[in-house]
Image (cartoon, rainbow, N blue to C red):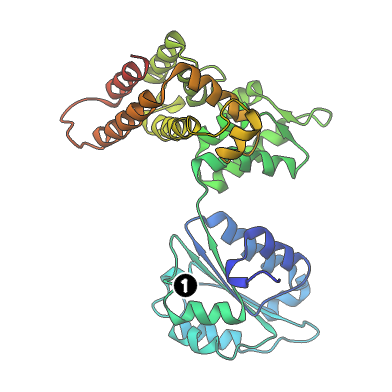
């Protein structure tokens, strides 16, 4: 069965575009700008030949046009020999109305490829404009990557460019850069340029030298120290964070620790928690590489302690936002959390 256009992934949208299978309408919306830009840029650079773009391609911004002006552009026929006309509306969230687009979607011109780029949010799917676009074209929602998805994204992006990276290095980069994919990819591209042709592999040492993340004192290493109950190393890292705030902060630590102890609590209820492959499947992990952390965690913490730590992390998060916390600093909150975890 063919995939519904309204539920297509970035990969499937790009697969169709590269195969020359174009839809008359694309609504690209969501919080993650990277995928929206990738699709729109591919259409702008590949549908028409360079010599045909002056007469057959319009790229406008939502704050500069009305919905009726966009429809008038879309209703224009291509100037031969081009077979298509391309109209791309960037920052479409700034348009005052989409009523004219809704009517246009009832009878779109098949020779036109109309691309609506709606960033920093989504159009309410209950609105008719979305349903009508789904009926004749592609509606793609570009969602932000969650923190736990970023290391796999880093590995996948580098693999597609014939570059290898170990899991620790991928996590170091992901945790340091965060979920802004455009910035993350910019940093990855910078690192790849520095690699010699005969050794396309990124190591923690390369991450440290090129991105500035300490291979020994970072959020990833703090997590490892907590998993292994290495009190001395954990306190060393937190002390390093005090002097080097960019290396790590309470806000970067809490999501990582919460995710780990949440999964650790689940691991205790796995039907076969001593089997690495079975545990990886139960926890929905991409590989067995991360399972060792949970096997170690189950030796060092009880299920009850994991539950108590999760409650403490939630309390610390609330205090970091000023709730029931008149004057405790982030550094002190981190030390308090660390003490609670180890005792």
Q: How many numbered dots are placed on residues in this image?
A: 1
Q: In the depicted view, which residue is nearer to us: 260 or 72? A: 260
Q: Quadrant of residue 3?
A: bottom right
Q: Residue at x 57, y 54 (%)?
A: 34
Locate the C terminus by quadrant: top left
Q: Secondary structure at mark 1?
A: loop
Where 67 sits versus 300, above or below?
below
Q: In the depicted view, which residue is nearer to us: 286 or 159? A: 286
Q: Residue at x 45, y 32 (%)?
A: 256
Where 173 sits versus 81, above or below?
above
Where 225 sits versus 330, above or below?
above
Crowding at dot 1, Cα within 10 Å, few <14 / some 14-19 / many 20+, comes out as: many
Q: Residue at x 39, y 28 (%)?
A: 249
Locate the N terminus by quadrant: bottom right
Where 58 sits versus 341, above or below?
below
Residue 209: x %, y % from top left: 61, 23
Per the image, the residue denoted by label 1 is: 62
**Residue at the extreme right of the image, as rendered:** 198
Residue 93: x %, y % from top left: 44, 69
Q: Position of 69 compared to 136: left or right? A: left
């Amino acid at each position: 069965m063919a995939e519904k256009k309204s539920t297509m992934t970035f990969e499937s949208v790009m697969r169709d575009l590269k195969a020359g299978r174009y839809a008359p309408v694309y609504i690209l919306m969501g919080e993650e700008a990277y995928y929206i830009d990738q699709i729109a840029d591919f259409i702008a650079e590949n549908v028409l030949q360079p010599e045909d773009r002056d007469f057959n391609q319009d790229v406008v911004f939502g704050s500069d046009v009305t919905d009726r002006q966009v429809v008038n552009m879309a209703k224009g026929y291509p100037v031969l020999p081009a077979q298509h006309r391309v109209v791309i509306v960037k920052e479409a969230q700034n348009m005052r109305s989409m009523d004219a687009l809704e009517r246009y979607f009832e009878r779109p011109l098949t020779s036109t490829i109309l691309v609506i780029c709606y960033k920093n949010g989504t159009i309410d799917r209950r609105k008719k404009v979305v349903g009508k676009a789904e009926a004749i074209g592609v509606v793609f929602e570009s969602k932000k990557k969650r923190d736990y998805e970023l290391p796999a994204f880093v590995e996948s992006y580098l693999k597609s460019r014939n570059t290898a990276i170990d899991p620790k290095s991928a996590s170091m980069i992901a945790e340091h850069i965060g979920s802004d994919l455009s910035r993350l990819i910019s940093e990855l591209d910078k690192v790849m340029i520095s690699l010699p042709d005969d050794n396309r592999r990124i190591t923690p040492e390369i991450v440290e030298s090129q991105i500035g993340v300490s291979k020994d004192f970072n959020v990833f290493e703090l997590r490892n120290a907590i998993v292994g109950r290495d009190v001395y190393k954990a306190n060393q890292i937190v002390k390093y964070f005090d002097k080097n705030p960019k290396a790590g902060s309470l806000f970067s630590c809490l999501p990582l620790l919460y995710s780990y102890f949440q999964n650790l609590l689940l691991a205790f209820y796995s039907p076969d928690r001593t089997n690495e492959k079975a545990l990886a499947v139960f926890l929905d992990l991409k590989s067995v590489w991360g399972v060792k952390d949970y096997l170690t965690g189950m030796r060092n913490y009880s299920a009850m302690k994991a539950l108590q730590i999760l409650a403490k992390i939630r309390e610390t998060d609330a205090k970091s936002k000023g709730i029931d916390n008149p004057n405790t600093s982030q550094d002190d909150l981190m030390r308090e959390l660390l003490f609670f975890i180890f005792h």
